[in-house]
Amino acid sequence: MAPTPAASVGVAIPKNIDPKTRITSKEGRTISLKNIINLEHKISEFVQCYYNHQRVHESLDNLTPADVCCGRATEIAKARDEELNHEIQTNG
């Protein structure tokens, strides 16, 4: 049985289990497998769409992880320097 992508967040779910299957936690809360899979999808979507491509990270010199990964860091730094120099020349 091959696990679904939910394994990326530490949950191994075999593909042949019915999505209507309900799981009960140690605390007694019940959740459907379909909700777990939907949550995994939403987390993945958030990371791919927002966290990696829109949100700048201070530890990455205010670049997105996608900018760094795709090699755009130098290009962006150069553009920022040019803009800063222009502002200094314009406003003294």
Image (cartoon, rainbow, N blue to C red):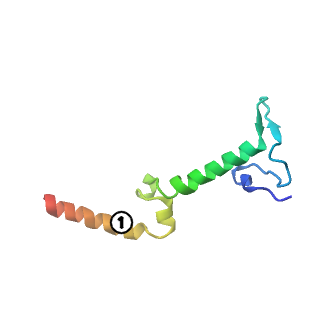
**Percent position of residue 59, x then y:** 45, 54
Seen as rendered, the residue at the extreme left is 92
Residue receiving disc 1: 77
Residue nearer the viewer, 2 or 82: 2
Query: From the image, which quarter does the N terminus lie in?
Result: bottom right
Q: Is residue 39 left or right of residue 77?
A: right
Quarter assignment of residue 80:
bottom left
Seen as rendered, the residue at the extreme top is 28
At x 80%, y 51%, the residue is 13
**Percent position of residue 73, x then y:** 42, 67
At x 57%, y 57%, the residue is 48
Q: Secondary structure at mark 1?
A: helix
At x 74%, y 53%, the residue is 7
At x 73%, y 49%, the residue is 10
Q: Is residue 11 left or right of residue 84?
A: right
Q: Amino acid at mark 1?
A: Ala
Label 1 crowding class (10 Å Cα cut-off): few <14, some 14-19, many 20+?
some
Note whether 42 is above or below 29 in the view shown.
Answer: below
Query: From the image, which quarter does the C terminus lie in?
Result: bottom left
**Percent position of residue 88, x then y:** 18, 61
